[in-house]
Structures are given as C-alpha cells and as structure tokens.
Image (tube, rainbow, N blue to C red):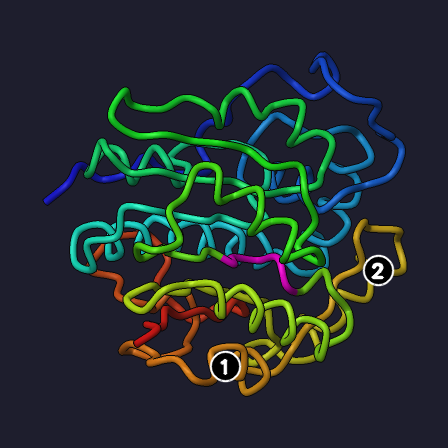
Amino acid sequence: MAEQPEQPEQLAHGTPAEHAPGPDIDNSVPHSARIWNYWLGGKDNYAADRAMGDQIMNYFPEIAENARGNRYFLCRAVRFLVEEAGIRQFLDIGTGLPTVDNTHELAQRMAPEARVVYVDNDPLVLAHARALLTSTPEGATDYLDADVRDPDGILQQAAATLDFDRPVALMLLGVLQFVEDIEETRAIVARLVDALPPGSYVALSHPTNAVRGPRMDEAVKQWNDGGGSPRLTLRTTDEVTSYLDGLEVLEPGMISTSLWRPELFAADETRPIDDFGGIALKR
C-alpha cells in the first residue's frame, strides 16, 4: 500500500498571505479559497478571511470537519484512481490553495508518470501556482488560470498537457456550489464529461444540508450575507447525484465524503458530514 498522506490540516505551502507576492488581491473581502485554507489550518489567508471563518465556526463548528472530510476524500479518490483504476491523467478543476498532498503529489507518489492539470481562477491561487508546478521528471503538472464556467476553454488549454484519447480523471471537488444556476452546472459537467474518452472517471463532491439541515442552511446564509466570495449554493443529494447521470456510479454511491471508502485513508472523523461525493466511470 502506498504511503499514507499527511494530515491535511497540519501544513500549507508558501509564505503567509500577508507577505505573498503575486497579482493584485483584495484582502478586505473574504474569499472561499482562503477561508477554506484557514479551516484546514493553513496560513494563506487574510484577517477578513479569518474573521468570516471564525464567524461561521462559532455558529457551526462542524464546518472545519466538512473541510477536512473533503480533503480526505481527495486523498481517497486519488488513491483509488491511481492504484485500482490505473488512471495516470488528472484534470483538477477548482484547485484551491496548495496545502499538503495535492493531487499531483498523491498521484506521482504512486505513479511518477502521472500528469496533472490544475484549474482555478483565484488570484491568490495563481500567486502560489509555483507550489503546484512541481513534478516528477517522468510526469507533468500544469496550472490554468481559468473559470469552471468556461469548459471549452479549459479543455482546449488542458490538451497541451493531457491526452484526451486516453482515460482522464476529472476532479470536481467543492467547486460547483459556486455556480448558482443548477442548469448551468449540469451543462458544464456534461460538456466536460463529453470530452472524456471511455474508461475515464469523474470524482465529484458538493456541500448539502442532508445531515445537519437548518444549521447548515444558516451557515451558508451567514457566508453569503457576510460577503463571502463567491456566493455558495447548497444542493440536495439527488441534485448532486444528477451530475453523474449517464455514468456508472461506483459503490458506495453518492454519500457523505467522510464515509466514502474510508479504508483507503484512515481519518479521525468518520461520522456523516454535509459534504457529499462519489466517483463515476464513463463506459
């Protein structure tokens, strides 16, 4: 078995955000990638991000558990895709800020020849993209400054690194909630999946209120009313599952990410969380 990933909340790459070089960043507005980084114990965040993160955690302390659960799901998903499914190419959209055990680090630890393309449109992620551009000599990594709402542009640019005649793992972890219209999100996923050859996989996760109901609703309302950027939209488990229509959803289905194949990565927290995910195969 491959080496266990480090605990994702322990470390984050790079210098603190207050000293990070890069593009012009408005540090007065809390942003999802930086708040998520804060909840994971990272240091790439600003005072506004920490204030918003604390406000939500004071009301809904389980939000940090959701963040960790989603990160552990990434670890499990990549392990399954590399070791069991034999995938060697990844298109990771909605990358977020680099922490420990990013997709390319996990994949290339098990398969040095793995090729990974990251996609995000957060300026702070762009500033730290250098942490995502390391690679084994046998493999490759690339970073695209692009928006999930432009699937054609993403596919065109990703083709410089990935071979779309061979299976690809499409990673859509914690990104679709930032597109408010569900029909638009369905169209985005359908376009991306259409470009994948048979034998490809889709790993997807999305926040819901299926576990903690109104408390999760209120946490999201605080986010949106407090100026969290971008706005966040919860969806039902049926709506999340619908993104994988036409694909073969693998066992155990679309479930709480903390419960998805926990044997692939032993985490401290295994109770259900309001982050649902799954993996599906394109035949």
Residue sitting at 22 percent across and 31 percent down? Answer: 112
Residue, disc 2: 224
Label 1 element class: helix
For the point 71% across and 53% down, the residue is: 58
Q: Quadrant of residue 203?
A: bottom left
Tell me the amino acid under the disc marked 2: Asn
Horizontally, residue 60 falls left or right of residue 117, namely: right
Residue interval drawn in magenta: 172-176
Foreground pick, 277 / 92: 92
Rendering coords of residue 230 (x, y %): 79, 53
Residue 239 in which image quadrant = bottom right
Report the quarter where the N terminus lies: top left
Name the residue located 26 percent from the left edge and 62 percent from the top edge: 262
Residue lying at the far front of the rendered structure: 165
Element class at badge 2: helix
Q: Is residue 265 at least partly visible in the picture?
A: no
Q: Residue type at mark 1?
A: Thr
Q: Find residue 178 and report its horizontal and vertical position in percent.
A: 72, 60
| Pick the front one: 161 or 121 | 161
**Badge 1: residue crowd in 10 Å (few <14, some 14–19, many ≥20):** many
Q: Which residue is mark 1?
A: 241
Query: Where residue 166 is drawn, which disc sits there?
Result: none
Q: Relative to 198, does residue 151 appear above or below in the rendering? A: above
Question: Is residue 278 positioned above or below 162 on the image?
Answer: below
- Residue 33 drawn at (x, y percent): 66, 42
**Contact flag, marks 1 and 2 (Cβ < 8 Å):** no
Identify the image quadrant of the C terminus.
Answer: bottom left
